[in-house]
Image (cartoon, rainbow, N blue to C red):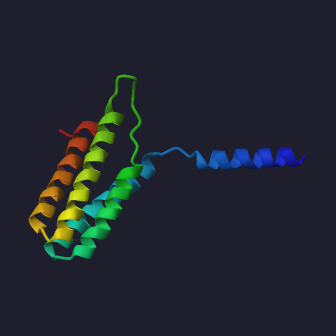
Amino acid sequence: MKKIMMGLLTFGIFTFNAQAYDQTDRIKDMQSMESAMSQIQKGILYNNKDMVLQAVVKLKKAVSTIEVAPNSELDYSTFFAKRQSSNIKKYADGIKKNMESGHKHGAASNYTRVLDECISCHNKIRKWN
């Protein structure tokens, strides 16, 4: 009886934890990314290094959780999104490094690169024209 109860409990936990990443999760992550980008821009404009550094952490966390499910076997959107995510993290690290060094123009340049990655991903995945 104990084994059956433990088995059911374990199955329940795995079922609960195996919740799929859905549209609601994606919307939350995108909103979090947008909020982080706004905070980075504001921090650069206000010369507030702490604001920028906090937003970089927030941005990298949101980017790490985003998933894109392929629509077919020949759909490479998932690979493209992962590459974009990797690039965003790289440029976010550049923002952090530049802000810590006091190079606001370099931080702004990396901010623009992050924004370019966002736009190119939306062009491909969301079929923006």
Residue at x 22%, y 74% (from the top left corner): 49
Residue at x 12%, y 68% (from the top left corner): 104
> For this view, does 22 lie left or right of residue 56?
right
Measuring from the top left, give residue 21's x and y in whole percent: 48, 45
**In the picture shown, does residue 105 fall above or below 66?**
below
How many numbered circles does the render carry? Answer: 0
The answer to whether residue 23 shows anywhere in this view is: yes
> For this view, does 57 lie left or right of residue 43?
right
The answer to which image quadrant residue 46 occupies is bottom left
The answer to which image quadrant residue 45 occupies is bottom left
Q: Residue furthest right?
A: 1
Q: Nearer the viewer, residue 42 or 95?
A: 95
Residue at x 21%, y 76% (from the top left corner): 48
Q: Residue furthest top?
A: 74
Q: Quadrant of the C terminus?
A: top left
The answer to which image quadrant residue 71 occupies is top left
> For this view, does 104 lie left or right of residue 39?
left
**In the picture shown, does residue 103 fall above or below 111?**
below
Measuring from the top left, give residue 69's x and y in whole percent: 41, 36
The answer to whether residue 31 shows anywhere in this view is: no
Measuring from the top left, give residue 32's x and y in whole percent: 35, 60
Q: Nearer the viewer, residue 128 or 102?
A: 102
Q: Residue furthest left?
A: 105
Measuring from the top left, give residue 113's x and y in whole percent: 16, 52
Residue at x 31%, y 69% (from the top left corner): 54
> For this view, does 51 lie left or right of residue 104?
right
**In the picture shown, does residue 35 fall above or below 8?**
below
